[in-house]
Image (spheres, coloured by chain):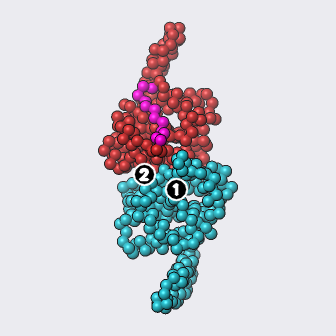
Chain colours: A cyan, B red
Amino acid sequence: MRTAVIVAHPQLEDSGTQRFLKEATTSLRRIDWHELKVNSSGHFDAVAEKKFLKDKKRIIFQFPLYWYSAPAILKQWMDEIFDIADVAWLQNKELGLAVSLGQPLKEYRLGGREGIALSSLLSPFQAFAKRLQMRLMPLFIIEQFVYQNDRKHQELLTKYQQFLELPIDFNFDQSQSWFENKLKEMMKEIDVEDKKKLELILEGYKERHEQLQELTREVSLLRQEDDQHGEQ
Amino acid sequence: MRTAVIVAHPQLEDSGTQRFLKEATTSLRRIDWHELKVNSSGHFDAVAEKKFLKDKKRIIFQFPLYWYSAPAILKQWMDEIFDIADVAWLQNKELGLAVSLGQPLKEYRLGGREGIALSSLLSPFQAFAKRLQMRLMPLFIIEQFVYQNDRKHQELLTKYQQFLELPIDFNFDQSQSWFENKLKEMMKEIDVEDKKKLELILEGYKERHEQLQELTREVSLLRQEDDQHGEQ
């Protein structure tokens, strides 16, 4: 499954967030990073853009929220490239939005400073996906990147990579296997001493994974029972 | 009260709707028609644009719905011109949206083809107005202009002029007085024969206006009684 990341940012070179996210994709093999830029006549080459998208299964629109919506360049790209007839080749592709916020997410709730939910502000993308019969993924939100500490950044990196690579409704098991694969890939690139340490970590990780799988199964059985009894 | 009509249309010269709306403003004295166009470097002159807006009490964003939102050029204009500090001079101005639709309005309802309300799709403008402490006017919707007959066009013309000229929460009385003024203005520009006919019409109109005013008062009294008894 190939994924296109369409990056729309008015001052891309100044964006620490976008630099971080780009860095996060360098180790991923099936990601095509695509920064939007108009040509010398101020437009996009619709034929070339469509060609680029055709073999992608998943398309990510990635942008900072600008006046409660995507920056103008993404809208221009959409306006110039797509029309309703494109449903023919867009249908069944997945559409994801990776949106970075300068304010805390809680401001976009009832009673928050903005008081309007992101899901409402971004609803034009929902309508867009619906009309072109694409499947809209759950929003991926990057909240105040510059205020996040290193641990938060590490978490973001993992979640972002999973957002790009895992199936939409990935389960716990898929997430764990994804981690194992990442560890294995890392092992290929390090020296012998570190390798031994990592092998031990991986060993322990797999063991824990199996234990966790069993626990998950038990919990889901208990939940099923609960659901059967608890419904009113 | 001066009003700015900011027109955003990717193919303005081909738009019969925009031509019609422009024509509708030629007889209005306090309207400044402003068609968005980037300069040779592909941008807007923020200083000039702000200067243009400063003395306007009401600002109308007028555009066709393009992929469930405003065309890119309006977003570019917003992105390049405004920042949060502009609340200082924008607050208390009125913001109106005049949106033309290629599809029937009913498609933007639950169960309609799009299934998402215009008020949700256009909620970024609500957040924009809120943040800059502008007052958002009720949406002005132009539904499938090309399929409307002459009578509908005439109705649209009147409603549009009222949207531009009347106070936000105009009442029946203000609407009637507005009509009288329009008739009087028309009278100045026609020959003597027609003038006499129009004077008769105006006479009758004023009389009906007074009768209607009285009826309105009565109805509102009855409603008040109803409200007092009917609340549970």
**Residue assigned mark 1:** A36
Kindly identify which chain the residue marked by label 2 belongs to. Answer: A
The chain containing the residue under callout 1 comes to A
Cβ atoms under marks 2 and 1 closer than 8 Å: no
- Amino acid at circle 1: Leu
**Height in image: B146 above or below A72?**
above
Kindly tell me whether residue B222 is visible in this rendering. Answer: no
Quadrant for the N terminus of chain A, please. bottom right
Task: Name the secondary structure under disc 2.
Answer: loop
Q: Which of marks 2 and 1 is nearer the N terminus?
A: 1
Q: Residue A67 carries which label?
A: 2
* Cα distance between the residues tagged 2 and 1: 19 Å
Question: Is residue B37 shown in magenta?
Answer: yes
Write down the region rendered in magenta.
Answer: B28-40
Residue at far right of view: A88
Assign the magenta stretch its main secondary structure.
Answer: loop
Image x and y of residue A78, in percent:
56, 52
